[in-house]
């Protein structure tokens, strides 16, 4: 079969061969990538402010990740850890156990996707507590499996038409001052849930993203996470921190929950763990994680040796390249540039986020109560045409999130901000 040289031809073939349920943000078919730059089949260059949805904190094709994968491929690509194990799985588990916050001894389960991590975290929590209920938050995103969708706090497009979902799942408001939801309101809603819907002795876990990902990069304040930790301890409930998007230095801490100084009972990790290779993890307190009996956890491709090799290289790079410091510096540069744009464009309602997990909320006439999702869509499309890959998100569909690789040079961030300014000028003209 011939290989088309244009995005339009490939898009036509994609529409004829791939299900419509898989959306595509920008119909640019990529042939090459390096650090924070992409090139499509037509040779056009793009600056990548998406990182494959927060997967590439170490950038595209980092030489050390590539070298680790190449070395592993020369030995073997797959055996299934449950059949004949291999050392890289064990070494990675040891390093993750030491890396996550808190003094309690930890254990690790490796999987392939973030949704798998969430599914298994719930299984482990139920096995340990003997309880069925799980509490999540409105605006949260936890995957596209049935349990993941049940936990996700947004119907369109993730849940519409796919129910019924597993029972005993409950949702609370996520505290966000910009949207008029206080911490007190959210905690009061939890007490009301205990009074009206499910007694705390039937709740296995509360799952929360310390920074909402798909929900719009709203940040759970340290005091709120600390209050949840206290309530969970009071009622024998496990606290699960979903760090799939916020983990591995994106926020300027290795994990976002470190800002609150809490120790989760379970953490779900994925995305930037393995520098672009499919790998996820559930890491938690030893007693909790060992509640599942042998054979109850696992998966054919879970903990792929290729992905484990990549992840070990990524953990080295966190220290060698000081990724937390790079995240803080990148965040300062992004926010300074966005605040300058906010002085020009009244549509920018708020700029927020820890480290390099930065968001810009688009509203009408600076009014927080008037979100502008249409402008957001036009801006993403215009930026793509100009060579800047952007992602939108948010419970109201009006947030631009910035997820450039943490290894992006400052001049490239500046160039991306310039393209963003040009795009804003064009869509507002």
Image (spheres, grey):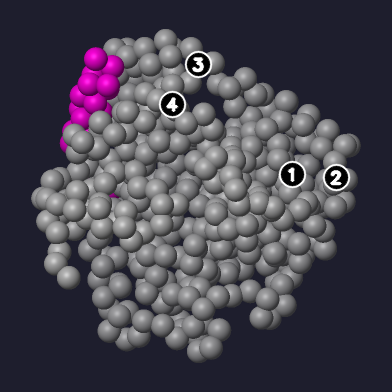
Q: Residue under circle 2?
A: 198
Which of the two marks, 4 or 1, is nearer to us in this view?
A: 4
Whether residue 92 is visible here, answered yes or no, is yes
Q: Earlier in the sequence, mark 1 or mark 2?
A: 1
**Which secondary structure, mark 3?**
loop
Which one is in front, 295 or 101?
Answer: 295
Q: Is residue 416 magenta?
A: yes
Where is residue 15 shown, x and y percent of the image? 32, 54
Q: Residue at x 63, y 74 (%)?
A: 297
Where is residue 375 shown, x and y percent of the image? 37, 23
Drawn side of residue 219 relative to residue 79, left or right: right
Q: Is residue 413 magenta?
A: yes
Q: Residue under circle 3?
A: 370
Q: Report if the CB atoms under discs 3 and 1 are less than 8 Å apart.
A: no
Drawn side of residue 333 relative to residue 362, left or right: left
Crowding near the residue tagged with mark 3, few <14, some 14–19, many ≥20 C-alpha atoms within 10 Å: some
Q: Earlier in the sequence, mark 2 or mark 3?
A: 2
**Which secondary structure, mark 4?**
helix
State the CA–CA distance, disc 2 to disc 3.
Answer: 35 Å
- The relative height of residue 153 versus residue 372 in the rendered view (above or below) is below
* Quadrant, the N terminus: bottom left
* Quadrant, the C terminus: top left
- The relative height of residue 350 versus residue 217 in the rendered view (above or below) is above
- The relative height of residue 27 versus residue 73 in the rendered view (above or below) is above
């Amino acid at each position: 079969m011939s290989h088309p040289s244009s995005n339009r031809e490939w898009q036509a073939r994609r529409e004829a061969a791939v299900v419509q349920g898989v959306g595509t943000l920008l119909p640019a078919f990529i042939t090459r990538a390096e650090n924070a730059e992409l090139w499509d089949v037509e040779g056009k260059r793009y600056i990548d402010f998406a990182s494959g949805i927060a997967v590439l904190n170490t950038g595209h094709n980092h030489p050390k990740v590539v070298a680790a994968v190449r070395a592993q491929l020369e030995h073997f690509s797959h055996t299934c850890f449950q059949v004949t194990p291999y050392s890289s799985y064990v070494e990675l588990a040891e390093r993750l156990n030491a890396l996550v916050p808190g003094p309690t001894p930890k254990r690790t389960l490796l999987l392939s996707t973030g949704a798998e991590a969430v599914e298994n975290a719930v299984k482990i929590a139920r096995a340990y507590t003997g309880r069925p209920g799980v509490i999540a938050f409105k605006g949260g995103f936890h995957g596209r499996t049935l349990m993941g969708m049940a936990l996700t706090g947004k119907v369109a497009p993730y849940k519409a038409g796919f129910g019924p979902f597993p029972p005993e799942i409950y949702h609370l408001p996520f505290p966000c001052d910009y949207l008029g939801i206080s911490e007190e309101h959210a905690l009061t809603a939890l007490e009301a849930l205990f009074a009206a819907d499910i007694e705390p002795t039937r709740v296995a876990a509360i799952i929360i993203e310390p920074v909402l990902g798909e929900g719009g990069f709203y940040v759970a304040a340290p005091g709120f996470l600390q209050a949840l930790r206290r309530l969970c301890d009071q009622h024998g409930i496990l606290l699960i921190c979903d760090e799939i998007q916020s983990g591995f230095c994106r926020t300027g801490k290795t994990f976002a929950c470190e800002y609150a100084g809490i120790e989760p009972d379970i953490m779900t990790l994925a995305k930037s763990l393995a520098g672009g290779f499919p790998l996820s993890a559930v890491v938690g307190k030893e007693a909790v994680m060992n509640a599942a009996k042998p054979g109850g956890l696992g998966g054919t491709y879970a903990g792929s040796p290729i992905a484990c090799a990549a992840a070990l290289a990524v953990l080295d790079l966190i220290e060698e390249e000081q990724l937390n410091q790079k995240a803080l510096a990148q965040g300062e540069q992004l926010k300074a540039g966005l605040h300058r744009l906010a002085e020009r464009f009244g549509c920018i309602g708020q700029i927020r986020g820890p480290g390099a997990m930065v968001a810009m909320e688009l509203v009408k006439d600076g009014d927080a109560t008037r979100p502008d999702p249409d402008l957001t869509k036009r801006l993403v499309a215009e930026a793509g045409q100009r060579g800047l890959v952007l992602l939108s998100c948010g419970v109201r569909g009006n947030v631009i999130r910035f997820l450039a690789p943490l290894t992006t040079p400052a001049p490239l961030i500046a160039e991306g901000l310039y393209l963003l300014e040009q795009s804003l000028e064009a869509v507002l003209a």
